[in-house]
Image (cartoon, rainbow, N blue to C red):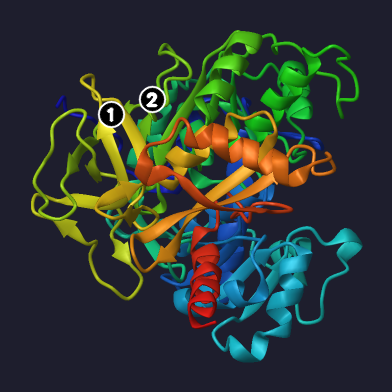
């Protein structure tokens, strides 16, 4: 594999470098205006000065809520510049999850929006290490008791710039990001400066980012991958907090966006709207559907699987490739991406990003498998985490390979095709069943709005397919006949071990903030019900 080179500098050095290279260039654009790289760099200095003053030392962990706001970028780089570690606080999680993160990571100061600050203040007696809560969005300075408005906090810091580092080690901890917890309690992933800088360079190379690029961030949260890669490239970032796909396309057109980052669920909604618009009436849509934004060159999706049919339809209608990527918190996070000059809608998550190696192994023996053979995906590269909180170094196989827990196969050209999570796959007799493979067949039926598959415990076969389904028209007459017809049509295209044996109508599929089905909670409920049925 060719040698992949990336700069050995602290993560906040990416911003400092961008500010020196082109200080007047746009770094972040929001509904309130734009901030140049020089302005963002200066604001990061203010955050750093406040933390040096408030903490009086380096090496602490600072919670930063990754809201889709320019102050996340300033707090993120400012925390790192002050010699402390960023702990990402998801503002969408409930109180119990927030407490778990703050306890496990020993958070001492937190920069959070008002709603999150209220939760932290209420549990302050159970978080003895938390010394300060700073509210980043306080209207007119109104904040919860025992919290500080951001403006007051920053004004309390001395005007001097932060002290320079005495020495820099790229392998020191920079960020702690907690896993989604879909297969267990969320774990703190320790990422180093090397991990994050390398992945910024890898992402920028894979996505073809440069100083002329304008990236539109249409995600519910501000992820460091998108922030770091754009700053590394000197690209402008446009933040779009509105969840409506049509609004994102309109903003992309008005701001000259070249790269649009969004979620598969939002692309699915847009594809569904496009299909509806092609019908006889073409009316009743929540938004008018704009055409392709003028400078747009690519749409990029990640976090969960994007249906190939959606990618193909959107690619045709927008006239640009709609691409899928793959990664996880433990890998900073990106490891694979389809390339902008590739083919849309193949079902692949792409080839490894520069400096990354991937292989598929037999999950029982660890023996590497050839192209087309299905097994567990393993990855290695400079973006591999330092380890989990409290667990030392990362769990790796011989040769430094990290086992992802995902099941997949590679094509002859190195493209990776994911099948499922190792924990989500279940056995019917001796055959493995992939829930996502069954879901893809069911979802192709236009009467299905959404669906999820989990294994229902079975004393004879091990487990059978249970299907939870959200109907596109739940008020249609003959509900049982509709369900029977959907299941019959799907089973006709499924292998014997994949046959749907149980089906239920759901109001909605439970999903994580990134759009992944919450199979773990569904499995718990089904096990209880299966046990109750067996004992009846």
Residue 279 in picture, x, y percent from top left: 80, 14
From the viewer's perspective, is 16 left or right of 120? left
Q: At x 38% / y 24%, what residue is drawn?
A: 205
Tell me the residue that label 1 is attached to: 354
Quadrant including the N terminus:
top left
Helix, strand or loop at label 2? It is helix
Q: CA distance from mark 1 to mark 2?
A: 7 Å
Q: Quadrant of the C terminus?
A: bottom right
Residue occupying image coordinates x 76% and y 24%: 273
Residue 223 rendering spot, x and y as whole percentages: 54, 46
Q: Residue 519 vs residue 295: left or right?
A: left
Q: Mark 1, residues whose alpha carbon is within 10 Å: few (<14), some, or many (≥20)?
A: many
Residue 38 seen in this snapshot = no
Say which residue appears at 64% left-offset and 36% top-offset.
Answer: 485
| Front position in the image: 395 or 162 | 395
- Assess disc 2: are there few (<14), some (14-19) or many (≥20) residues with their C-alpha within 10 Å of its C-alpha: many
Q: Which residue is mark 2?
A: 206
Q: Is residue 186 above or below residue 122?
A: above
Q: Cβ–Cβ below 8 Å for labels 1 and 2?
A: yes
Q: Is residue 463 above or below residue 481?
A: below
Residue visible at 40% across and 55% down? 424
Residue 472 locus on image (x, y percent): 75, 37
């Amino acid at each position: 594999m060719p040698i992949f080179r990336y700069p050995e500098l602290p993560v906040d050095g990416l911003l400092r470098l961008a500010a020196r290279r082109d200080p007047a260039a746009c770094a972040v654009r929001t509904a309130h205006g734009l901030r140049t790289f020089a302005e963002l760099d200066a604001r990061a200095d203010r955050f750093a000065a406040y933390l040096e003053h408030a903490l009086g030392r380096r090496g602490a962990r600072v919670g930063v809520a990754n809201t889709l706001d320019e102050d996340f970028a300033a707090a993120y780089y400012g925390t790192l510049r002050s010699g402390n570690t960023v702990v990402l606080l998801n503002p969408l999680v409930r109180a119990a999850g927030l407490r778990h993160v703050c306890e496990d990571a020993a958070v001492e100061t937190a920069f959070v929006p008002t709603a999150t600050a209220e939760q932290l203040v209420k549990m302050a007696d159970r978080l003895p290490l938390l010394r300060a809560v700073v509210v980043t969005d306080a209207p007119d300075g109104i904040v919860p008791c025992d919290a500080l408005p951001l403006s007051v906090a920053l004004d309390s810091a001395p005007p001097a710039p932060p002290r320079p580092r005495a020495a820099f080690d790229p392998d020191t901890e920079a960020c702690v990001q907690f896993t989604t917890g879909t297969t267990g309690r969320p774990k703190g992933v320790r990422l180093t400066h090397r991990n994050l800088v390398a992945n910024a360079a890898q992402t920028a190379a894979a996505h073809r980012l440069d100083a002329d690029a304008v990236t539109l961030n249409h995600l519910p949260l501000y992820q460091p991958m998108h922030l770091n890669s754009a700053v590394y490239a000197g690209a402008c970032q446009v933040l779009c907090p509105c969840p409506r796909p049509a609004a994102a396309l309109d903003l992309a057109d008005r701001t000259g966006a070249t790269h649009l980052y969004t979620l598969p669920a939002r692309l699915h909604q847009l594809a569904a709207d496009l299909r509806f618009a092609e019908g006889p009436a073409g009316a009743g849509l929540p938004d008018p559907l704009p055409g392709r934004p003028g400078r747009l060159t690519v749409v990029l999706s990640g976090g969960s699987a994007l249906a190939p049919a959606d990618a193909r339809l959107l690619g045709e209608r927008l006239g640009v490739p709609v691409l899928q990527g793959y990664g996880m918190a433990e890998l900073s996070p990106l490891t694979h991406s389809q390339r902008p000059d590739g083919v849309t809608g193949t079902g692949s998550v792409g080839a490894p990003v520069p400096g990354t190696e991937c292989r598929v192994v037999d999950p029982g023996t660890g023996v590497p498998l050839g192209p087309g053979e299905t097994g567990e995906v393993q990855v290695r590269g400079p973006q591999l985490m330092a380890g989990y909180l409290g667990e030392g170094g990362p769990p790796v196989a011989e040769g430094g390979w990290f086992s992802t827990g995902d099941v997949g196969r590679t094509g002859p050209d190195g493209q990776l095709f994911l099948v499922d999570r190792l924990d989500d796959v279940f056995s019917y007799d001796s055959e493995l069943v992939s829930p996502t493979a069954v879901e893809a067949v069911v979802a192709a039926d236009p009467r299905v709005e959404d669906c999820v598959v989990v294994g229902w415990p079975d004393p004879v076969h091990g487990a059978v397919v249970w299907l939870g389904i959200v109907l596109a028209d739940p008020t249609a007459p003959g509900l049982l006949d509709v369900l029977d017809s959907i299941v019959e049509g799907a089973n006709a295209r499924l292998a014997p071990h994949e046959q749907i044996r149980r089906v239920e109508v759901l109001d909605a599929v439970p999903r994580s903030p990134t759009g992944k089905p919450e199979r773990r909670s569904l499995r718990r409920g089904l096990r209880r019900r299966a046990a109750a049925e067996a004992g009846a």
